[in-house]
């Protein structure tokens, strides 16, 4: 017996790429159980220096001991082969080299090897006609990457990103729950796995619609021919409600959003935030946003927004957010000229509690020491408008309400006119003085000058009620913090008062002067009084604060107009009575006045405050009295003399009387009296009995 010692030989081979099968033909029966697939190397040619080659890493056979063996190529190996551009693309690029460990014959003789330079060309070739399928996909929302796993190697360069749609469920009839990618970058080369970096815009639109917000809401459908395999076979479509695939792996968004830049428009009052991803607008807490005038906010004025500022597009989740500044916030910012008047004075910092993204991640904080400078700054170009005003004649204040913060130091009261009607056809008064202690702000309180107040009150048809209180202003009245002038209110379309407070302050007699030479009392009041209400009988002249002697007037009149100073004319009766009493009004020291509340009213009917005060000025009587008339009763020897004013009876000198026969100054018979008994009372009338020896 001579045993078989001849090694087997590989005579020919073929390949069916579609079936992933190699057909091996030997010159004798071989032992299939001894097959070692790793001994096979596939080559694109026998030119080793220029050939593409691939050594199989695995595989097996179900064939028995035969002269022909069918070898199943592993998916891994087949995909690796397909990833090459030259191997097994046709019969002309299909060569095989083997080593002796490939297989043995039935007597354990190893096969003869075939070196690479003598590689055996395939005699049968069947190209791939099977369309690739999408098996699964993994989604990483944190990195924004989606990885597709296909049934075979595909050509990455043929991948059409726009053929991919993500949706919230297997069946998604509502288009709002589906999003088709518009752009992306294919990260890997040819192979069974293709990763796409999703364009940030697409990623944000998905987040906005809450698509792929969890693995349960992460489904994909793809269009037919979204990608091709290496033979050009198009991908089988993955359809909604038919074959949609849920993510096999999911990584949620774990990165906090970041504020990239912002714009501030002080004309429209809008703060626009631009972030790197979609945020949940309902989470925005404006109180965590702070403006300051420099990059390092430490030690400088800072303004934190309040809840008066609101989100313009609340409910519309987006990466750009418009915050409409509340009027209070806008005015508060404008009150500080060092803040937000230019790009150089506009910086923003925020805390991590300011907002979150759609996954609940907090925004990345911007520290107050590294505040972010504004990108685009639009200064305030809106002219301030006077929205309303209040007039308080008790406090003598004029309160102006503007549409925005104005610069208090720019106030020019000369631009303000009060008028009695919507159209300036009646009484009006333009302020001449006055000022404000108000800070910069939308409300300015003017402290009216007392002279202006009194002049206004003299005009009986002006500013006595809401009905006749109107205001007009010029554009020079005030400016806002950006130096924009006030919108004028013309006299032909004046603004009516909002709140009118009538004068409730009673007038006071501030001082008085007595002129006995002119027979006048000059009364000075704290405010304008109504001269028509003056009642002389409410005036008492007296010698001291606590009087010993006094006299109450019984009459008198004034020709003064309404005002703070009233000149009162004393009647002759009162004048004579005052002079008759030598205990009063003979000097400044004994000249006092006492008035009752009924003396006079102001222009609003407020009664004067009762008071007793000393005269501030006193002018004594320097006008000599004169003899007005006289009578002589020769039966009784009684002479009666009437003077122009009260005379001092004690100063009467009978010897200064000469009685003559005519009024002629020529020498006429006359008699000079030498004495007599005169009345002792001071009066305008003096009577005297002539001594009897002179009666003849």
Image (cartoon, grey):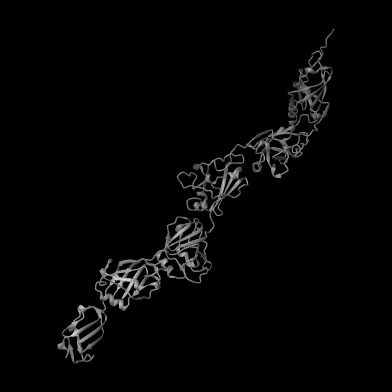
In the image, taking residue 130 as reference, residue 299 lies left or right, namely: left
In terms of image quadrants, where is residue 227?
A: top right
Q: Quadrant of the N terminus?
A: top right
Give residue 160's position: percent from left, percent from top: 72, 39
Q: Nearer the viewer, residue 166 or 92?
A: 166
Q: Nearer the viewer, residue 493 or 47?
A: 493
In the image, taking residue 165 as reference, residue 285 lies left or right, namely: left
Give residue 81's position: percent from left, percent from top: 75, 29
> Is residue 661 in sight in this rendering?
yes
In the image, taking residue 368 as reference, residue 154 lies left or right, namely: right
Q: Residue furthest left?
A: 693
Q: Residue at x 47, y 64 (%)?
A: 415
Give residue 380's position: percent from left, percent from top: 53, 55
In the image, taking residue 632 as reference, residue 292 lies left or right, namely: right
Q: Residue furthest top?
A: 1
Q: Nearer the viewer, residue 77 or 534?
A: 534
> Is residue 112 in sight in this rendering?
no
Q: Residue furthest front?
A: 636
Give residue 65's position: percent from left, percent from top: 82, 18
């Amino acid at each position: 017996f001579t045993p078989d010692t001849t090694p087997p030989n590989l005579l020919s081979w073929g390949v069916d790429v579609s079936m992933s099968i190699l057909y091996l033909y030997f010159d004798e029966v071989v032992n299939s159980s001894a097959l070692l697939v790793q001994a096979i190397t596939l080559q694109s040619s026998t030119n080793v220096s220029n050939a593409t080659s691939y050594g199989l890493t695995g595989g097996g056979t179900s064939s028995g001991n035969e002269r022909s063996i069918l070898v199943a190529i592993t998916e891994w190996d087949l995909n690796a082969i397909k990833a090459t551009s030259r191997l097994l693309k046709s019969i002309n690029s299909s060569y095989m080299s083997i080593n002796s460990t490939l297989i043995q014959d039935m007597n354990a003789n190893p096969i003869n090897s075939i070196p690479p330079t003598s590689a055996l060309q395939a005699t049968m070739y069947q190209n791939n006609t099977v369309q690739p399928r999408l098996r699964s996909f993994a989604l990483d929302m944190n990195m924004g990457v989606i990885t597709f796993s296909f049934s075979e190697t595909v050509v990455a360069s043929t991948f059409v990103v726009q053929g991919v749609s993500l949706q919230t469920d297997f069946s998604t009839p509502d288009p709002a729950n589906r999003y088709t990618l518009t752009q992306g970058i294919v990260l890997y080369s040819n192979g069974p796995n293709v990763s796409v970096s999703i364009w940030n815009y697409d990623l944000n639109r998905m987040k906005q619609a809450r698509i792929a917000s969890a693995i349960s809401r992460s489904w994909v459908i793809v269009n037919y021919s979204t990608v091709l395999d290496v033979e050009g076979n198009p991908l089988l479509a993955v359809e909604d409600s038919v074959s949609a695939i849920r993510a096999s792996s999911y990584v949620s968004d774990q990165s906090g959003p970041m504020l990239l830049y912002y714009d501030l428009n002080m004309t429209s009052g809008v703060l626009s935030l631009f972030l790197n991803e979609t945020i949940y607008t309902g989470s925005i807490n404006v109180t965590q946003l702070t403006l300051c005038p420099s990059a390092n906010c430490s030690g400088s004025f800072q303004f934190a927004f309040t809840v008066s500022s609101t989100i313009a597009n609340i409910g519309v989740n987006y990466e750009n957010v418009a915050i409409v500044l509340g009027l209070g916030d806008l005015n508060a910012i404008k009150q500080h000229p060092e803040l937000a008047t230019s790009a150089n004075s506009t910086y923003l910092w925020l805390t991590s509690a300011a907002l979150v993204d759609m996954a609940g991640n907090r925004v990345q904080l911007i520290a107050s020491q590294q505040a972010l400078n504004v990108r685009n700054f639009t200064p305030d170009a809106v002219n301030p408008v006077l929205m309303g005003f209040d007039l308080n004649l008790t406090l003598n204040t004029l309160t102006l309400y503007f549409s925005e913060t104005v610069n208090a130091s720019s106030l020019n009261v000369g631009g303000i006119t009060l008028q009695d009607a919507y159209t300036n056809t009646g009484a009006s008064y333009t302020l001449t003085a006055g000022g404000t202690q108000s800070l910069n702000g939308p409300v300015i309180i003017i402290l009216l000058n007392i002279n202006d107040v009194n002049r206004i009150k003299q005009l009986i048809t002006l500013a006595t009620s809401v009905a006749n209180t109107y205001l007009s202003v010029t554009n020079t009245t005030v400016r806002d913090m950006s130096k924009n002038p006030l919108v004028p209110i013309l006299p032909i379309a004046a603004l009516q008062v909002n709140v009118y407070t009538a004068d409730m302050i009673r007038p006071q007699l501030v001082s008085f002067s007595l002129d006995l030479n002119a027979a006048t009392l000059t009364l000075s009041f704290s405010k304008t009084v109504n001269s028509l209400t003056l009642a002389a009988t409410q005036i008492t002249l007296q010698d001291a604060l606590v009087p010993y002697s006094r006299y109450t007037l019984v009459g008198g009149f004034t020709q003064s107009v309404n005002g703070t100073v009233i000149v009162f004319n004393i009647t002759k009766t009162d004048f004579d009575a005052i002079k008759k009493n030598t205990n009063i009004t003979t000097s400044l020291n004994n000249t006092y006045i006492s008035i009752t509340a009924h003396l006079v009213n102001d222009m609003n009917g407020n009664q004067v405050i009762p008071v007793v005060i000393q005269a501030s000025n006193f002018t004594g009587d320097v006008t000599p009295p004169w003899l007005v008339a006289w009578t002589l009763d020769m039966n009784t020897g009684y002479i009666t003399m009437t003077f122009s004013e009260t005379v001092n009876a004690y100063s009467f000198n009978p010897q200064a009387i000469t009685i003559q026969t005519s009024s002629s100054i020529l020498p006429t018979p006359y008699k000079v009296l030498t004495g007599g008994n005169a009345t002792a009372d001071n009066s305008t009338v003096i009577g005297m009995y002539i001594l009897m020896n002179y009666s003849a």
